[in-house]
Amino acid sequence: MNIALTGKTAVICGGSQGLGLASAREIALLGASCILIARSEGPLQAAVASLDASQGQQHAWFTADFNQPEKVQSVIRAITNDRIVHILVNNTGGPSGGPILAAEGGAFVSAFQAHLVCNQLLAQAVVPGMKAAGYGRIIQIISTSVKTPLRNLGVSNTIRAAVANWAKTLAGELAPFGITVNNVLPGSMSTDRLRSLFRANAESRGVTEATVAEEWRQEIPMQRFGDPAEFGAAVAFLASPAAAYITGINLPVDGGKTPSL
């Protein structure tokens, strides 16, 4: 099975921590040069230093705030100005939790810009190079909420579904060029994002974070939270030549928790 990414360049958004960094590490292990985008310079530098470079990879980083689409567009144009991006991993921190009726209208607008609009700008910039190279992988890190909405994540449920439909539409348009577009849906992975959800849920209910964590763990058939490296491996596989005939899918990486097919 050919999973080698030697000579390929990958852009990983939200790559300084969590599932973005886990994905970058696995993609780098397959031989790709990784360009990480996130908000803060310090964490980005540390993240790049943690990537495998044993195959001559040239890793780099750029800062951009995904609440500022024009900045994201400027950065991706700088990246694609002198190189082809073969792999794009779209990943942005999730909106704050809470009931959908409690959300202000602006929360939906901000999340739509940070997730869908930025994805669109990034894809528009990298697709011409992918077509020229005859190789392209666009992967979104979204949420299992695109299959079944999650409690107390009203804004996130709404925006994640929009991104999934955007990606499915794009997959159909790019399939004739051999460019695949897929979504990977994390369940409860051991990240700062998960811990923040525990905290918010505990505060709203007046219980301890440990209580919430145990309740959530019990809902997972595998009876444990996921390791970010396990998630990154799924992303790396979809980025590889071996996944050339897989496109337009939503792949849960959730220990079997999602109740739908």
Image (cartoon, rainbow, N blue to C red):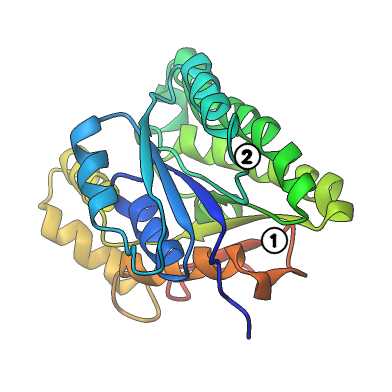
Residue 89 spot, x, y in % from top left: 53, 48
Residue 217 is situated, as x and y percent measured from the top left of the image, at 28, 70
Work out whether 67 lies above or below 132.
above
> x%, y% of residue 21?
34, 53
**Residue 141 appears anywhere in the view:** no
Q: Quadrant of the C terminus?
A: bottom right
Location of residue 257 with respect to 106 vertically, above or below: below
50 to the left or right of 116 = left
Going 43% across and 20% down the picture, which residue do you hit? 67
Q: Quadrant of residue 81?
A: top right
* Residue 23 position by quadrant: bottom left
Query: Label 2 belongs to which residue?
Result: 163
Q: Position of residue 249 (x, y in %)?
A: 69, 61
Say which amino acid is labelled 1.
Ile
The residue positioned 55% from the left and 22% from the top of the image is: 73
The residue type indicated by label 2 comes to Val
The kind of secondary structure element at disc 2 is helix
Please give the name of the residue rendered at 52% of the width and 41% of the height, measured from the top-left corner: 157
Residue at 52% across / 58% down in the picture? Answer: 185
Residues 92 and 204: in front is: 92
Res. 62 mark: none
- Name which of mark 1 and mark 2 comes first in the sequence: 2
Front-lying residue, 234 or 198: 234
Q: Residues within 10 Å of mark 2 (few under 14, many from 20)?
A: many
Q: Quadrant of residue 36?
A: top left
